[in-house]
Image: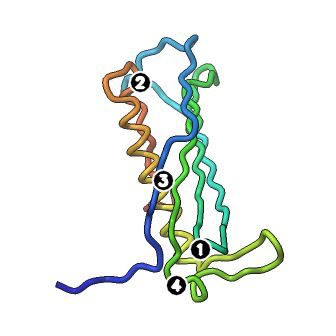
Amino acid sequence: MTEIESPYQIIAADITHFEVQPSVNISIAPSHILDYDVEQEQKLNAKKRLLLLTTSVKIRSKKTGELIIAMECIIVFKIRDFEKTVYLLEPDQFSLLQEVSISINKISIGVTRGLLSGKLTATFLSGAILPLLPFEY
């Protein structure tokens, strides 16, 4: 079997914030339309060669605009081939190889999707699955 060496490795993933609005008491059926607001932020600890990617998800009722769920996850990646993957610019600024950045963003969305699904299992919100985002196709 051929071993593939990735330029990064996931070393941690956790939910840092999770909130379900208690005033919202709806059943999420396939016909219920939800709005999803997803944001990602990358931070670098160059000394430790770690990339911290925070993914924030807000789910709202499309009918009322009411916030139903707010969640934030952090995924920590160890950058293996740091000098070839990360370009340090000015203080507190960096650039990643585009294909690595896209890959890390996709993985982080997938991890967030799984963590969200796990939190909502067996609740009235179990149908609120984070859909595929355009850059995941």
Q: Which amino acid does label 3 sit on?
A: Ile
Q: Tell me the residue that label 3 is attached to.
A: 109
* Mark 3 crowd level (few <14, some 14–19, many ≥20, 10 Å Cα): many
Q: On the rendered structure, is 78 left or right of 89? A: left
* Mark 4 crowd level (few <14, some 14–19, many ≥20, 10 Å Cα): few
Determine whether label 2 and label 3 are within 8 Å by CB.
no
Name the residue located 82 percent from the left edge and 73 percent from the top edge: 91
Q: Residue furthest front?
A: 47
Name the residue located 66 percent from the left edge and 56 percent from the top edge: 41
Q: Which mark is residue 81?
A: 4
Q: Residue 118 carries which label?
A: none
Name the residue located 48 percent from the left edge and 46 percent from the top edge: 14
Q: Tell me the residue that label 2 is attached to.
A: 125
Please tell me whether mark 2 or mark 1 is closer to you in this view: 1
Q: Residue 49 carries which label?
A: 1
Residue 106's spot in the image, x, y percent? 47, 61
Distance from Cα at disc 2 to Cα at disc 1: 38 Å
* Mark 1 crowd level (few <14, some 14–19, many ≥20, 10 Å Cα): some
Quadrant containing the C terminus in the rendered view: bottom left
Q: Earlier in the sequence, mark 4 or mark 2?
A: 4
The quadrant in which residue 123 appears is top left
Please tell me whether mark 4 or mark 3 is closer to you in this view: 4
Q: Which amino acid does label 1 sit on?
A: Arg
Distance from Cα at disc 1 to Cα at disc 3: 21 Å
Determine whether label 4 and label 2 are within 8 Å by CB.
no
